[in-house]
Amino acid sequence: GESVGLHLPTLSVQEGDNSIINCAYSNSASDYFIWYKQESGKGPQFIIDIRSNMDKRQGQRVTVLLNKTVKHLSLQIAATQPGDSAVYFCAENMGQAGTALIFGKGTTLSVSS
Amino acid sequence: GAGVSQSPRYKVAKRGQDVALRCDPISGHVSLFWYQQALGQGPEFLTYFQNEAQLDKSGLPSDRFFAERPEGSVSTLKIQRTQQEDSAVYLCASTRRGEAGTDTQYFGPGTRLTVL
């Protein structure tokens, strides 16, 4: 699988590999973190979220890890497929409804078959 | 089910023209957000509504930008005397609740505004 320790703007993987996308968030008081997938010409699509009282959450083929000590968030995609090709953004907020999301720098994931 | 819809999907304006962008949130959603996304960047917050009340407009870049949600459902973002730097994708998002607590923001497809 492909692993990236620091944020990189692009990540290229082979179909079937595991992908890891990293994100550093800015506000230590943030309570809620979300990963979005954005395909070309579309709006961001919710993938998975996590609260600050958790350090790991799993979904279907995706896992989000949260390290509050170093303010780091990662998204792991298992068995990456060509349909996973998109730009991935992490976002944070204070965890209260009505507070805006602050988006990180996106990572463009390219999956080749 | 129906998601967030936005219209028009594409808008080309001459510098100095006024434009109006529409957002239809998910039915029953209390909160509505507008974001601006420049090319190659993540979305940036513009303004927030809870029902018809505009509770936060701190992200609006200038007084040329105005948003409204008069009946607590459909929202319109208006940009007066458009400038080239206004060229971006304008995204709308809605959430079910308005009270405190985490709540997923669901985004529409966006309106791509190009100012010539």
Image (spheres, grey):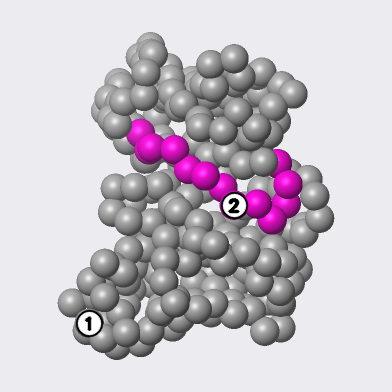
Instruction: Report the side of A92 relative to B19 (left or right).
Output: right
Query: Where is residue B48 shown, x and y percent of the image?
Result: 61, 64
Q: Quarter-wise, where is residue B50 in the image?
A: bottom right
**In terms of secondary structure, what is the magenta stretch mainly?**
loop
Amino acid type shown at disc 1 = Arg
Q: Residue furthest left?
A: B116
User: Image quadrant for the N terminus of chain B?
Assistant: bottom right
Amino acid type shown at disc 2 = Ala
Helix, strand or loop at mark 1: loop
- Number of labels in the image equals 2
- The residue singled out by tag 1 in the image is B15
Query: Where is residue A68 shown, x and y percent of the image?
Result: 61, 19
* Label number found at residue A100: 2
Q: Which residues are magenta?
A: A95-107
At 53% from the left edge and 39% from the top edge, which residue is drawn?
A91
Is residue A11 in the magenta section?
A: no
Rendered position, B81 above or below A9: below
At 77% from the left edge and 59% from the top edge, which residue is drawn?
B98
Instruction: Report the side of A1 relative to A66 (left or right).
Output: left
The chain carrying label 2 is A
